[in-house]
Amino acid sequence: LGMALHPDMEAHPYVFLAYTSEEGGKQVSRIMRYTYHAEQDTLLDPLVIQEFGAWTSHFGARLLIAPDGKLMVTSGDGAQDGYAQDTSVVLGKGLRFNIDGSVPADNPIAGSPVWAWGFRNPQGLFYASNGILYCSEHGDATDDEVNIVRKGQNYGWPAIEGYVDTEKEQAFAQGRAVTDPLKAWTPTIAPAALVAYEGNQIPAFS
């Protein structure tokens, strides 16, 4: 579902993978770290960073190494109502780990990899050169989104789809650190991978 190489493979020869597997009749998702051994041209020393239930859809699972050297991961909500808002589970979240799999001391919830929550099915993840983290996400029948992902913020799903623009959504957002998307699309467009174009050779993108 997702793969990331450490940007300094000489010092940290790590390959990070997100995948699903069926074991004992149940689906599981795993975030893994492997060590690349150049002599054998293979991946060895598997380390399970996080394992959680996968259910049947909304896997999400994008990975990248942040400018501060942390591992950032997105997870879908597994099509399980309520999980995206439950910070005790890792589904429907933006997650942040040290590259050894431990939880950073400055995460917003002590002892938890949860960095942000309220996601349905994140499909793209990218840091721009200014250090801002962007995430693209599939909505349901409405409101595909691009979000700026920030520490400790709630992105609303399933109570909020797209912008906070109905009375019900405004009531949910009251008193919560809910963040509107940078952009939302209805009809949906199914955004997938995400990159930031910062050049000047394509005028329409300037």
Image (cartoon, rainbow, N blue to C red):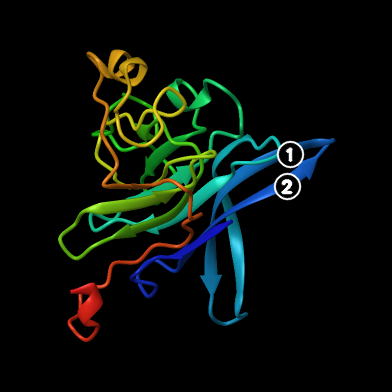
Label 1: element kind:
strand
What is the x, y in percent for residue 48?
57, 45
- Residue 10 visible somewhere in the drawing: yes
Label 2: element kind:
strand
As drawn, the residue found furthest toward the bottom would be 201
- Residue 100 visible somewhere in the drawing: no
Mark 1: which amino acid? Gln
Q: Please, is residue 107 above or below residue 149 in the view?
A: above
Task: Say which quadrant the C terminus sits in.
Answer: bottom left
Q: Dividing the picture into quarters, in which one does residue 179 lie?
A: top left
Which residue is identified by label 2? 21
Q: Is residue 124 left or right of residue 77?
A: left
Identified at 53% across, 80% down, the residue is 38
Mark 2: which amino acid? Ser
Could you say which is closer to the camera, residue 69 or residue 161?
161
Disc 1 + disc 2, Cβ < 8 Å:
yes
Circle 1 Cα neighbour tier, 10 Å, few/some/many (<14 / 14–19 / ≥20): some
Could you say which is closer to the camera, residue 98 or residue 26?
26
Q: Which mark is residue 192?
A: none
Task: Say which quadrant the N terminus sits in.
Answer: bottom right
Real-space Cα distance between discs 1 and 2? 6 Å
What is the x, y in percent for residue 10?
37, 75
As drawn, the residue found furthest toward the front would be 187
Identified at 61% across, 64% down, the residue is 44
Q: Which mark is residue 27?
A: 1
Q: Please, is residue 200 above or below residue 185 in the view?
A: below
What is the x, y in percent for residue 190?
51, 54
Q: Dividing the picture into quarters, in which one does residue 80 lie?
A: top right
Identified at 39% across, 58% down, the residue is 64
Identified at 39% across, 40% down, the residue is 94
Could you say which is closer to the camera, residue 169 or residue 65?
169
Q: Is residue 117 left or right of residue 92?
A: left
